[in-house]
Structure formats: structure tokens, C-alpha cells
Image (cartoon, coloured by chain):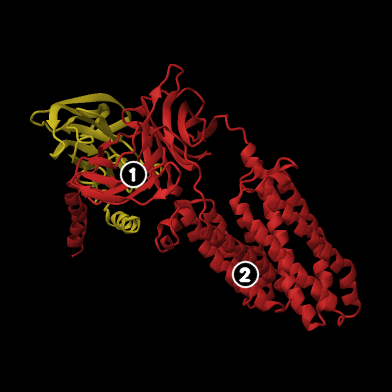
Chain colours: A yellow, B red
């Protein structure tokens, strides 16, 4: 049993693709200095319990946040100061949405849903790096925190992390 | 065309996403419950997941510390594990790795106890396996001392292929033995039968222990020494053999009872010196014997050169050996009262005989040969006896693999184990009491990089023992009135080098993760 099992485990590790059962961004690559529609895919609840709240932390350099309304869910945002001033449509902005929250709904564990906001990636963001959007998924019972950011920064997730934060790879403006 | 390719490339992540709608399996519950104490041994363990899974590896380590054969069956969302009927009283650990629908492996461990909570004794060593481990150990020593040492002697002093066959043979034996050691040690760690050597598990777990670096260095040293023979220039073979000799010292200093004894700044360098000097001496014996037998006219020069360096080196060899013996023994009585001490006594007796012969060679036979290079009979006989003594010493020393030094058994058992983890972001002090196999209380003192109390919202402790194949167990800590985080009654069923991970949630969106190892006695 043990022998056969080991081979199986090795195979499973080998075939597991980078895409996985985590909360992730639908589009994982975008040019800086452009609009970006962030679609958060939520494939399941917290250990079987239905999802009742999704909170997304907006990283520095992502501005002009406009959450898409969602039937059955209430949208709230938390505003705060940016680290620096950004140019947006010819005017200077120094504060804006830092966190988006959907609550009041109920997403069963065996259903799938998406949570969307549109945003603008400022031109000052560095291409060839990864921007992380930490997500806290609150359920009727328990919480899943998709907040692990690899220590190296932009090198992608180590296989170890069970709860990686959704990442967006930045590319140069075409 | 390029544009088409680019858009195709952009589509690829989307394709992967399609398969990603599957969920990871999560353990919802198990029967008996994790950490429960039962009056009667259960017939089976049932693990319930949130979705259908396929079991990959499920292992059971019983209260006696033995890995047991078990039958497993997947039934929909559950895994049924049929337990053996002769489980001993005490704490048993079930470690599982299952494959969820998305192909991702999910792993964890659960413990339950029969009658009472216990810490397991170290597994008893099976005798045929012990004999093989012992033989392989001798083989590695032969390769390192006679093989690498012989290559060094040939390059630096002999300047010729004297005793070529013996050194080469020793290297070959050493390489085979080093490779075999990995598998055999792994079998011992996992307590598998000899047939298990064809699977990858024992090799992997042996590699994860301190034997991994030690044997790897030994293998590299022996391969380097092997090629030093064929190197085109004397300069290259000098460099290569010197490197290989350094490898001998490093390999010995990387593993074993003595290398891990405190104070390590003393024991590791001592072992390094002990290894190099022993290899210098042992390596010279076969080539010298060969030259004496052939009555080589080069012998007087070689002998003079060898002895000039050998005198101070043997001094170092004896000194470093004495130092290690004193640290390991703790007291003179241990020399006769413990099995470790008895092995050391035998070794000392053989070493004294060897030193006597060496003195005889140095002060009686060597001058005789220098005077007349045909007069080699007594030197030859004496070196042959030296060779036998050296093999005897190596065989005795290899027996140490099976006996803990008295130092280890007198260590104060009651002091809690303290582990300090320090990074730029944070400083965690972890106290584990009693730090032995069995139930343990953990105190996590979480501090920021500049030693202020770290305000955490949650703290989680994750423990695993890779060398025994025990998958991670996660335990939530609670904040005590003392400002520290506590996890009480964590069952660590077996002793060993546990891996510990602490996650401290600082804000809803940020956590600090630190890892270290924990030596559970």
C-alpha cells in the first residue's frame, strides 16, 4: 500500500498545475498605465461552510476603484491616503479606495462566483513584478485568508503556501 | 503571425483557469476525534473530507514508535483506515496524504491514544538491518580513510602507484557503501522491511537527516580522490587530493553523536582534524606495505617524508580524539558502565597497540630501512599488523551508530526546550515543555524586530516530522493573560527533529510566518 501510494503522490505533485483551487484573479497579467478589470474567482467556501463576506485589500498604485454591483450583496469600501500623489485623468489624487468589501450574500460551498471591480494601474508601477491583492474570505463558520505573499517578492508562489494572495503580473505598456 | 502567437500565449493562463474551478479537499472531521483518548483500541479510523478524494499515502506510527502496515479504502468523501488489532497502549499517529479532485495533494496528521497519552520509545533496531548498516559504515570509513587517504599519499608523498589496487578498492567499497548507507538508514528510520529499499521513501527520509550532507560530502570526496589518480599533472592531483581530504574532515564533522555535542565550536573542528589526520595515517599504510614488500629503492625517501609529517599529525589525532572522548563520556566510570564507553575502551586499547607499532616503525624499523633499503621484512610485517588494527578500530567505531553517548543520557530532562527564531520582521521565542515525546505545552512569545510585544490577532502552530513521514499538524494558539500565546497538550508522539512553523496574523491582510526546527527527545 505504502509503495504504490508513494508513486501516486509523486505523480500528483508532478501534474498539479500552477492554477489551483485558491481564490485567484481571472486575468493574471496586465500592462501598467492601463485600466484593469479585477475579477476575483471564488471556487469554494471555508472547509465546506458557505461564504458570506469577501474583503479585498487594494495594493498601492492601483487607483480609480469602481466595484461592480452584485445582486444580493452589499458593497462597502474603505478609503485612505495613498503613499504618493498620482495623476488620474489630468488631476492629482492623493487618496482613494484601499479596501473593497462584499457582504450580505451567501455563496454555497459547491457554487462558484466572481467578484469584480474596475481599476487603473498607474504608469509608475514597475513592469515584470507581481502585485498582490490579499483577500479575506469570511464564511458562516471560519475564515480563509488568501494573504500569503512570497518572501522573494515577485518570483511567484512557493509550492508550500496553502493560502496564497491572488497575484497580478505587471508588464510594460505596449 | 507573431501577434497570433502572442494572443495564443495570453490565452494559456485562461485555459489553466478552466480547470481551477475545482476545490481543494479539506478534512472536516475524523473518528476517533483528533487528540482523543479511548478506553478500547478502535477497529478503524475514518477521515471525512468535504469532497471525494483518493488516498495516496496513509501511514500509522504506533505507540511503540513502529511504522505499521495498514489497509486503506476510499469511500466517497471518506478514507477508512483499518487498524491492526495489536496496537499497544499509548499514543498513535496517523499521517495522511490524499489527492483532491483538482489533483492537488492535501496532507495532515491526527493522533489518538489508547488508555493513556504517551510518548513513544525510539524504534528497536532489527538485527539483520543493523548488521548491514554497520558493514556499510565500515565501508564508508574504509573509502574515506584508506581510499581518500591513499590517494593523498600517492599524490603528495609516494609519487607513484604503490598500493594502487588497495586504495582504489577501498574507494570503490566506500562509494558503494555510502550509497547503500542512505537506503539502509532510511529503512531504519521508517522501520520498513529490507525489501522497502526499492522504494524512494527510505532514501528521501535518510537524505533529510544530517546523514544527507555527511554522506553526500563523503561521496564527492571519494569521487574526487578517484579522479585524482588519472589527473594529467602532479599539480592537479595535489589540489584534488587535498580537496578530497578536506571532504573527509567535513563529512565526519557534519553528522553523528560527536558532531552534535555541545560545545559545537569545539567538537566539529575536533572531528574535522581527527578525520583528516586519521586519513593521512590510514591512507599511507597500504602503499607503504606495498613498497616494503617490493623492496622499492624509493622507500627510504618516502618513509622519511611520511614520518616527518606523521609525528605532529598523530599528536593532533590523539589530542582531538581525547577531547571528543572527554566531552562524550562525561565521567571516567562511563568508560566501563555504558555500552558507548565499552566501545571507546576497546578502541583505546587498539589505538594504544597501534601507537606502539607506529613508534616501533618510527624509531627501529625506519632507521633500519634508511640504512639498507633491502632490509624491509620487519617493517612490512609491522605495517600489515597496523592495517589489521586500523580495520579493527574502524569496525569498533562503526558500532557507535547504535549507542547514544553517556552525555546524551545525563542531559537534564526537565528544562523546557527553548527555540529562538529571529528575522528582520519579527523575533519569536518558543518554549516547549517538557520538550520530550508525549504531550507538550508550547508558549509563543511573539515580538517585533526591536523586541516590543507583537500585537497579533491570531497565532497558529504547525508541526511536522519529515524524517518519519509525519505530515503537518495545525494547532491554534490562544492568547494568555501574560501577553503570550499558548498551545497546551500538543501530542508529539515520537522523538526526532520536528519542523515548526508559526503564523502570526498581524492585520486581517498581513501575517508573519517564521520556521525553525525542534529537537524532541
* Residue ID for mark 1: A126
Which of B338/B439 is in front? B338
Q: Tell how many labels.
A: 2
Using the numbered discs, state the Cα–Cα distance from disc 1 to disc 2 in whole angstroms: 50 Å
Which quarter of the picture shows residue A36? Answer: top left
Query: From this viewpoint, is residue B468 visible?
Result: yes
- Locate residue A128 relative to residue B203 in the image: left or right: left
Q: Are marks 1 and 2 in contact (CB under 8 Å)?
A: no
Q: Residues within 10 Å of mark 1 (few under 14, many from 20)?
A: some
Numbered disc in front, either 1 or 2: 2
Q: In which quarter of the view is residue B360 placed?
A: bottom right
Q: Residue A9: x percent and y percent?
A: 31, 54
- Residue at the (87%, 72%) spot, across then down: B365
- Residue at 48%, 39% (x, y): give it: B516
Residue A7, label in figure: none
Asked whether B202 or A22 is in front, the reply is B202
**Where does label 2 land, which residue?**
B225
Residue at image position (22%, 28%) is A141
Do the residues at discs 1 and 2 belong to one chain?
Answer: no
Could you say where residue B297 lies in the image, as x and y percent from the top left?
82, 82
- Residue, x 45% and y 61% (percent of image)? B194
Whole-percent x, y for residue B322 in the image: 75, 49
* Element class at badge 1: loop
**What subunit carries mark 1?**
A
Badge 2 marks a residue whose secondary structure is helix
- Residue B54 visible somewhere in the drawing: no
Tell me which chain the residue with mark 2 is part of.
B
Amino acid at each position: 500500500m505504502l509503495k504504490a501510494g508513494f508513486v501516486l503522490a509523486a505523480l500528483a505533485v508532478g501534474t498539479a498545475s500552477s492554477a489551483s483551487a485558491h481564490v485567484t484573479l481571472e486575468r493574471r497579467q496586465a500592462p501598467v498605465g492601463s485600466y484593469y478589470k479585477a475579477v476575483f474567482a471564488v471556487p469554494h467556501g471555508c472547509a465546506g461552510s458557505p461564504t458570506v463576506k469577501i474583503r479585498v485589500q487594494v495594493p498601492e498604485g492601483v487607483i480609480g476603484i469602481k466595484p461592480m454591483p452584485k445582486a444580493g450583496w452589499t458593497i462597502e469600501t474603505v478609503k485612505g491616503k495613498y503613499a504618493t500623489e498620482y495623476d488620474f485623468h489630468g488631476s492629482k489624487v492623493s487618496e482613494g479606495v484601499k479596501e473593497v468589501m462584499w457582504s450580505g450574500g451567501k455563496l454555497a460551498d459547491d457554487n462558484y462566483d466572481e467578484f469584480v471591480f474596475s481599476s487603473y494601474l498607474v504608469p509608475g508601477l514597475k513592469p515584470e513584478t507581481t502585485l498582490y491583492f490579499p483577500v479575506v474570505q469570511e464564511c458562516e463558520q471560519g475564515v480563509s485568508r488568501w494573504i500569503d505573499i512570497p518572501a522573494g517578492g515577485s518570483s511567484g508562489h512557493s509550492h508550500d503556501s496553502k493560502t496564497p494572495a491572488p497575484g497580478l503580473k505587471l508588464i510594460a505598456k505596449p | 503571425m507573431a501577434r497570433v502567437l502572442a494572443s495564443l500565449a495570453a490565452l494559456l493562463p485562461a485555459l489553466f483557469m478552466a480547470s481551477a474551478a475545482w476545490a481543494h479537499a479539506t478534512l472536516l472531521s475524523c473518528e476517533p476525534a483528533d487528540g482523543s483518548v479511548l478506553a478500547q483500541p478502535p477497529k478503524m479510523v475514518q477521515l471525512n473530507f468535504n469532497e471525494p478524494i483518493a488516498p495516496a499515502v496513509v501511514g500509522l506510527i504506533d505507540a511503540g514508535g513502529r511504522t505499521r502496515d495498514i489497509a486503506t479504502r476510499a469511500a466517497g468523501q471518506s478514507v477508512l483506515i483499518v487498524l491492526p488489532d495489536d496496537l499497544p497502549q499509548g499514543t498513535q499517529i496517523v499521517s495522511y496524504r490524499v489527492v483532491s479532485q483538482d489533483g492537488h495533494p492535501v496532507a495532515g496528521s491526527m493522533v489518538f491514544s489508547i488508555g493513556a497519552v504517551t510518548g513513544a520509545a525510539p524504534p528497536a533496531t532489527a538485527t539483520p538491518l543493523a548488521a548491514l548498516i554497520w558493514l556499510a559504515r565500515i565501508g564508508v570509513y574504509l573509502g574515506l580513510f584508506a581510499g581518500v587517504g591513499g590517494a593523498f599519499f600517492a599524490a603528495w608523498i609516494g609519487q607513484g602507484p604503490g598500493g594502487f589496487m588497495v586504495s582504489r578498492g577501498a574507494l570503490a567499497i566506500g562509494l558503494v557503501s555510502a550509497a547503500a548507507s542512505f537506503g539502509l538508514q532510511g529503512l531504519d528510520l521508517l522501520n520498513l522491511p529490507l525489501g522497502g529499499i526499492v522504494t524512494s521513501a527510505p532514501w528521501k527520509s535518510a537524505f533529510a537527516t544530517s546523514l544527507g550532507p555527511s554522506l553526500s560530502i563523503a561521496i564527492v570526496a571519494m569521487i574526487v580522490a578517484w579522479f585524482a589518480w588519472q589527473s594529467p599533472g602532479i599539480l592537479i592531483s595535489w589540489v584534488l587530493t587535498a580537496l578530497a581530504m578536506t571532504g573527509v574532515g567535513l563529512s565526519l564533522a557534519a553528522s553523528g553523536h560527536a558532531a552534535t555535542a555541545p560545545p559545537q565550536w569545539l567538537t566539529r573542528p575536533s572531528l574535522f582534524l581527527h578525520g583528516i589526520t586519521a586519513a593521512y595515517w590510514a591512507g599511507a599504510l597500504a602503499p607503504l606495505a606495498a613498497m616494503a614488500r617490493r623492496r622499492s629503492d624509493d622507500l627510504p625517501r618516502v618513509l622519511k617524508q611520511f614520518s616527518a609529517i606523521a609525528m605532529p599529525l598523530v599528536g593532533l589525532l590523539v589530542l582531538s580524539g581525547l577531547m571528543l572522548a572527554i566531552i562524550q563520556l562525561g565521567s571516567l566510570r562511563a568508560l566501563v558502565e555504558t555500552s558507548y564507553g565499552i566501545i571507546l575502551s576497546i578502541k583505546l586499547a587498539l589505538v594504544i597497540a597501534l601507537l606502539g607499532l607506529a613508534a616501533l616503525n618510527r624509531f627501529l624499523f625506519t632507521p633500519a630501512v634508511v640504512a639498507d633499503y633491502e632490509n624491509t621484512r620487519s617493517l612490512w610485517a609491522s605495517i600489515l599488523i597496523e592495517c589489521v588494527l586500523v580495520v579493527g578500530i574502524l569496525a569498533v567505531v562503526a558500532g557507535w551508530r547504535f549507542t547514544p553517548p553517556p552525555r546524551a543520557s545525563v542531559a537534564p530532562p526537565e528544562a523546557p526546550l527553548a527555540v529562538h527564531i529571529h528575522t528582520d520582521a519579527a523575533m519569536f521565542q518558543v518554549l516547549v515543555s517538557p520538550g520530550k515525546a508525549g504531550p507538550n505545552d508550547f508558549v509563543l512569545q511573539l515580538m517585533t524586530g526591536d523586541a516590543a510585544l507583537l500585537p497579533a490577532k491570531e497565532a497558529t502552530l504547525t508541526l511536522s516530522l519529515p524524517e518519519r513521514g509525519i505530515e503537518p499538524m495545525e494547532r491554534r494558539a490562544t492568547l494568555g493573560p501574560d501577553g503570550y500565546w499558548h498551545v497546551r497538550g500538543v501530542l508529539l508522539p515520537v522523538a526526532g527533529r520536528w519542523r515548526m512553523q508559526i503564523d502570526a496574523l498581524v492585520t486581517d491582510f498581513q501575517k508573519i510566518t517564521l520556521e525553525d526546527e525542534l529537537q524532541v527527545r
